[in-house]
Image (tube, rainbow, N blue to C red):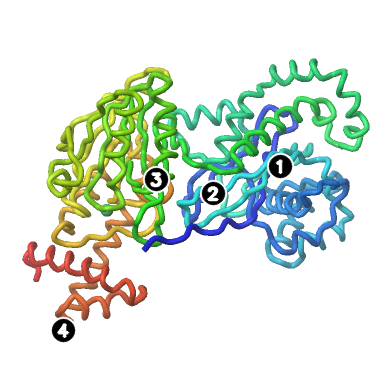
Amino acid sequence: MNQKSAIPRDAAAVILLNHAGDKVLWAQRNPQLAFLGGYHAFPGGKLEASDQLVKIKNCTDAEELARFIVCAVREAFEEVGVLLVRGGERLTKGQRVSLHDDLISNRMTFAEILEHWNLWIDAADFFYTGFWTTPKFSSVRFKTRFFLAVCPPRQKPYAAISELQNVEFIRPINALNEWKNSKVLIAPPVLLSLKTLGEFSPQRRRDAEKDTKSSSNNDSQKTQQISSEFLLKNFASLRLCGEKLLENSQAADGHIHYMELNPRVVCFPLKTETLPPATHTNCFIIGRKKFVVVDAASTDESEQNALHALVDSFIEKGFACQAIITTHLHRDHTGGELILQKHLQAKFGLEIPIAAHRLTAESLAGKVEFQKFIAGGEAFELQDENGADFQLQTMHTPGHARGLLAFYDAEFGFLLSGDNVVGSGSVVIAPPEGNMKDYLNSLETMKNLPNLRFLCGSHGAAVSDAKGKIEGYIAHRLEREGQVLEAFENGAKTPREIVEQVYTDISPALYELAEKSVAAHLEKLYEEEIL
Ligand SMILES: [Zn+2]
């Protein structure tokens, strides 16, 4: 059942600074997009074959970064209307808009536009800051090369296509504060970049500039090629910032093993025997100085080692693990909790309780021994990195499994929805463990949580519109229920007959799972005396 991770596609993005160099451009991806919908990100996108047709000047790099620079420039023009080319100062805003229209409507290729208007890309205007690869749990993955560049004077970025909204220059520190207060979700490489940009405050840049003033004379020949006034003034410090970004990317070889969804929640996808298209189960570490681990699910040794290394680093900082929690009985959620418990016992002499709902503990009797039970309704008292207290509410949400637990940080409006609602794939409701009526009640309860903003399920990425996502799930199930009822009234009597009439959009390989869902719908309809 275990699927291979998707192969990353080549892509490029631009870390675009404003002319003063103190703000960076970010935008929110349209919440309707399948890939990181609603997340904040830098302009960028996937490499196109035509990108290698564009010739660029001053590119001596052996790594053949030229086509990625072209990709970043084209994407910046397509997405935010900024033309990062030489010779572009002759164009009026109206002309740029008209060229943008030519490009978007495929009247002209990017190469044709540049040639026709005598514009060219100069590699000296871009600083390569390394690449990042989308984590393996995602069904769509990119290997994205990032370039630092400065917005040309008199060009104002805007949402040039419907893929993006809320395009703005923002101080890195302010962007990070939005994230720290759980106001936004940030694409993982963008978060990493913002943290580094935030370290290079204007003051620090000025200091760096002073330090390197004498040696920067060596760069004078290079800087003279650069038209940007900002780059002329700040080349040394900008270079330091770019070098730090590159160093981070190289140190990690572009891999992102886990994601900080907000300063309280780490999502650590672990490879498990789960249902396609998912390949991983999200393990969550919630809290810092006081934390819990949810679904240390993997039975794979290397996956466990990676998770243990992160948990160990928390313990070594003096942070205290309160519990290791299993959300429910399914095999892609259990298996690693006992190993983590033993590991922490052996390495640090810690006795950390394993916790679950009593129904889960009963189902896993003989396999996992539980020391703590969670009924739902109680809260874990946790602490963030600064020692500030916060509560993690527990919720008993039966439906997918009788003992399924979900968790809610009401202050941050962040729901960890377990297998109730997932970022990728669908949720199986298979009686007798699954119950459709319970499931819909659980969805309703989650939908009505006060202050609900984001959610992250056990599979796939976090979701920016939690309420909308849950409403979509409810609507989908009710629509299916209507179709099942109609098929039944049309004479289809067995789950298989109903599946063949109703599930016309799935492959026959999935009929068995669909039959279970139909059985769950029929059970609910009987219970409600509709059938
Ligand atoms: Zn499950």
What amino acid does circle 1 point to? Phe
- Count the labels in the image: 4
**Label 2 vs label 1, nearer the camera:** 2
- Is tag 1's residue or tag 3's residue first in the polypeptide sequence? 1
Question: Which residue occupies the extreme front position in the image?
Answer: 346
**Label 2 vs label 4, nearer the camera:** 2
**Label 3 vs label 4, nearer the camera:** 3
**Disc 3 target residue:** 301
Give me the C-alpha separation between circle 2 and circle 1.
Answer: 17 Å
The C terminus lies in quadrant: bottom left
Residue 199, placed above or below residue 359: above
Q: Which mark is residue 134?
A: 2
Give me the C-alpha separation between circle 2 and circle 4.
Answer: 48 Å
What amino acid does circle 3 point to? Glu
Residue 376: image location, x then y, percent:
17, 37
Q: Report whether 117 appears left or right of 44.
A: right
> Are circles 1 and 4 on residues that touch, CB within 8 Å?
no
Badge 1 density bin: few <14, some 14–19, many ≥20, Cα 10 Å: many
> Are circles 1 and 3 on residues that touch, CB within 8 Å?
no
What amino acid does circle 4 point to? Gly
Residue 526: image location, x then y, percent:
8, 67
21 or 368, which lies in front? 368
What amino acid does circle 2 point to? Thr
Q: Report whether 408 appears left or right of 369.
A: right
Badge 3 density bin: few <14, some 14–19, many ≥20, Cα 10 Å: few
Mark 4, secondary structure of its residue: loop
**Disc 4 target residue:** 491
Give me the C-alpha separation between circle 1 and circle 4.
Answer: 62 Å
Q: Quadrant of residue 293?
A: top left
482 or 149, which lies in front? 149
Give me the C-alpha separation between circle 1 and circle 3.
Answer: 36 Å
Q: Report whether 74 appears left or right of 141.
A: right
